[in-house]
Amino acid sequence: MKSINSIDLKTAVSHIKQVCDDSREANERLPFFFLVGAGISHPPIPLAAEIEKNCMAVAHNYGRGSEPVAKRSIATYSHWFEQAHPQPAQRQKYLRKLIEGYIAFLLGNKDKAREILTRAIAMGGEEIRQGEFRNADIHPLPQDEEFKDLVRSIPAPPTKES
């Protein structure tokens, strides 16, 4: 039986980035994957429950608040994800925004990370910022303290009342 090779997070991120860069250069579809609830990329990337909560808020904001028929976790996650982001391109963009900021940060591109996180916080509101803090506190890594400092330094988005 072949053994499973382990690599550190920075190397894994570098591998993923290279595959995405190669796909872009060849005008190929980006090779995205998403493991709901797997926790492999947690805490910097929200788990399914956090994503579902955010998607529910977005869906309600657009008047798409019908409750899911099925009550299994995967069914409610899928329901709210599709209600919040009805088009495939929207879903890909949302997932990309969840990971790109952290990937840029881990690769040492803090300016790019700030730019991406600023857009994500502007789109998702203060809930995105607070979600980053909650997630980073569950299984903290040494790099997460500096990442949280970066997130803290991004101005809060304007509220609907302002």
Image: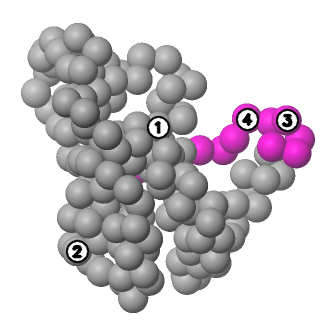
Residue on which disc 2 sits = 137
Helix, strand or loop at disc 2? helix
Query: Which residue was labeled with disc 1?
Result: 94
Where on the picture, by quarter, is residue 47? bottom left
Q: Nearer the viewer, residue 133 or 158?
A: 158
- SS at mark 1? helix
Residue under circle 4? 29
- The kind of residue tagged 3 is Asn
Q: Tell me how far mark 2 sits from mark 3, CA to CA.
A: 38 Å
Circle 3: element type: loop
Distance of mark 3 from mark 1, alpha carbons? 20 Å
Lower sequence index among marks 4 and 1: 4
- The magenta region covers 24-36
Return the x and y of residue 3 as percentages of the image width and height: 56, 80
Say few, some or many: other residues with alpha carbon within 10 Å of mark 2 (under 14 / 14 to 19 / 20 or more). some
- Quarter of the image containing the N terminus? bottom right
Indicate the quadrant where residue 45 lies: bottom left
- Marks 3 and 1, the one that precedes in the sequence: 3
Between 75 and 161, the one nearer to me in the picture: 161
- What whole-number distance in Å separates the C-alpha atoms at marks 4 and 1? 16 Å
Residue at point 41%, 60% (across, down): 154
**Mark before the other along the chain sequence, 1 or 2:** 1
Residue 25 relative to residue 21: left or right = right
- Residue 63 lies, with reference to residue 122, above or below; the image says above
Q: Nearer the viewer, mark 2 or mark 3?
A: 2
* Label 1 Cα neighbours within 10 Å, binned few <14 / some 14-19 / many ≥20: some
Is 29 colored magenta in this rendering? yes
Amino acid type, callout 1:
Tyr
**Looking at the image, which residue is at 30% across and 80% down?**
140
Q: Residue at x 76, y 61 (%)?
A: 18
Let me know if residue 2 appears in the view.
no
